Image (cartoon, coloured by chain):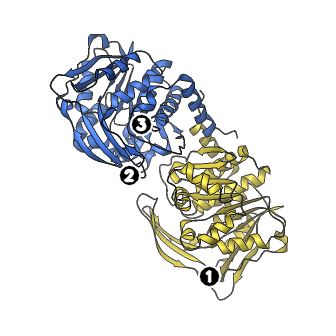
Chain colours: A yellow, B blue
Amino acid sequence: MSLVVIGSVAFDAIETPFGKTDKIVGGAATFASLAASYFYNKVKIVAVVGDDFPQEEIQYLQSRKIDTEGLQIKQGEKSFFWSGRYHSDMNSRDTLITELNVLAGFDPIIPDSYQDCEYLLLGNLTPKVQQTVIDRLTNRPKLIVLDTMNFWMDIALDDLLFNLKSIDVLTINDAEARQLSGEFSLVKAASKILQMGPKYLIIKKGEHGALLFGEGKIFSAPALPLADVFDPTGAGDTFAGGFIGYLAKVGTINFANMKNAVIFGSALASFCVEKFGTEKLRNLTQEEIAARVEEFVQLSSFQI
Amino acid sequence: MSLVVIGSVAFDAIETPFGKTDKIVGGAATFASLAASYFYNKVKIVAVVGDDFPQEEIQYLQSRKIDTEGLQIKQGEKSFFWSGRYHSDMNSRDTLITELNVLAGFDPIIPDSYQDCEYLLLGNLTPKVQQTVIDRLTNRPKLIVLDTMNFWMDIALDDLLFNLKSIDVLTINDAEARQLSGEFSLVKAASKILQMGPKYLIIKKGEHGALLFGEGKIFSAPALPLADVFDPTGAGDTFAGGFIGYLAKVGTINFANMKNAVIFGSALASFCVEKFGTEKLRNLTQEEIAARVEEFVQLSSFQI
């Protein structure tokens, strides 16, 4: 049994009020698979890079027991590259450069060894590619989580709506939930979105935490108040990876475990934003993660 | 021993996407004293109205055991009147009319019978008037909570900063915390604001809940996700009144009780926004309040 993550493996160049980077390793599948690897040791990625992608980065993923058989390396082509500049509030950003490169014609190949997929994370990517992965899996995974963004609602809404019919969990932010549903109230938005197919909806609210809807219940997870948010890039992908990684670890899908998965995903995301790119996600210990989760417990517990 | 609430008792005329009202009863002291009255039966108000204020509204406050001896009635003058229109997101609003009327020359009179004040809520009002109330109390109350808004930071910052040195708890919203501190991070903002005087800071985040800072700890309270927010007017005052009313009831000031007070204040505020003005706050039962608080428990609890 395994956890398959599909998404970009790419280069980012980031400017924030705290500094700027040259091209560093990023991409939804990179962040998500790293996060998941702290909970589950059968994480497998489906992605594509060019021949400019450093071999040692692939070896690093492998060193974390992440299976890269589904990572295509296109000779003579370049990896996806995104460059952006965050505003001083760190909530909004300008895209400076988007070079699709190998992503433009990405045809996801599912190795035979991935057909044991039990947990599938469809990271933020063209809805059609996400659907192709579902189609190419012989057996329907036990849990399918889909992450997406407003960009796909703008240009590929029908494809996205089609995908929603075949997934279990959708993760989007509050603005995207409002856009997708046409409702301002997140309660009404969730109700409409759950009618579109997913059994569960997670609305990510950045510094305000996250809401989990499903089984007629709502769970509100806090965000850890941080003195410094260094670089928000990848926080959503990290959340999704930590979320599904935790569920793969515990193995039972119910609302109580989903709530804990939201907390563990939030904990991983809170580490992610403390450094540029994947830096902070590379050397966490289980003790650090447990201590961070305990901070979430302390932050939100009360006894009436 | 008593809980003294100072603030406006006034008329509001409100337009929201759901409808509009004629002049209805509002004002910070009205909302706050009503909320507090559900927890504590020695609530006393200090305020001023004109002779246009309906006698039956004063009798209604009295029927809820709210002492109105400190409510001045100015013959030949008119009550404070505010009119506003909320935008479709219900988070922003335009002020259409502000008629200060009796509030312009408000000199708060503290009846002798109020000198047993143990809990003082300085509702949103001119900082100088708030300070006058502190000065006119013979004994320093056990707990002073101050609520204010960006308007006073704009035009009376020095007076407000002076007040902060003599209070225990400050309640403001997130934009105001950023304005007051000059820090975007709420953790840094709280750290700076706590150095200005208050022992505790509550940052109200509307639909995103509230953060309580103090004793080197942070508590994150969720907001109840509501399908319909009918009228946000008075929600902050209601929160403050429920908060201090609960603390007056339990009688011991510590972080655990402050956390619960934030939850009870949030619960009362969640009722407030369900109808126009004070309507929903007028006929709550203890059972309804307990059920609402249980919703907060269910919403935010998890077991790791």
- Residue identifier under label 3: B235
Same chain shared by disc 3 and disc 2: yes
Q: Residue at x 41, y 37 (%)?
A: B276
Q: Residue at x 58, y 80 (%)?
A: A100
Q: Quadrant of residue B12?
A: top left
Where's residue A42, x and y in %?
A: 79, 62
Of the pair B3 and B12, the residue shown nearer to us: B12
Same chain shared by disc 3 and disc 1: no
Image: A26 above or below B46: below
The amino acid type, in three-letter code, at marker 3 is Ala
Q: Residue at x 45, y 32 (%)?
A: B280
Count neighbours of disc 1 (C-alpha within 10 A) and say few if under 14, some if 14 to 19, many if 20 or more.
few
- Residue identifier under label 2: B87
Q: Quadrant of residue A53?
A: bottom right
The disc at residue A104 is: 1
Where's residue A124, x and y in %?
A: 62, 67
Which quarter of the figure is the C terminus of chain A placed in? top right
Chain holding disc 2 = B
Of the pair B185 and A1, the residue shown nearer to us: A1
The amino acid type, in three-letter code, at marker 2 is His
Chain holding disc 3 = B
| Cα–Cα gap, marks 3 and 2 | 16 Å
The amino acid type, in three-letter code, at marker 1 is Ala
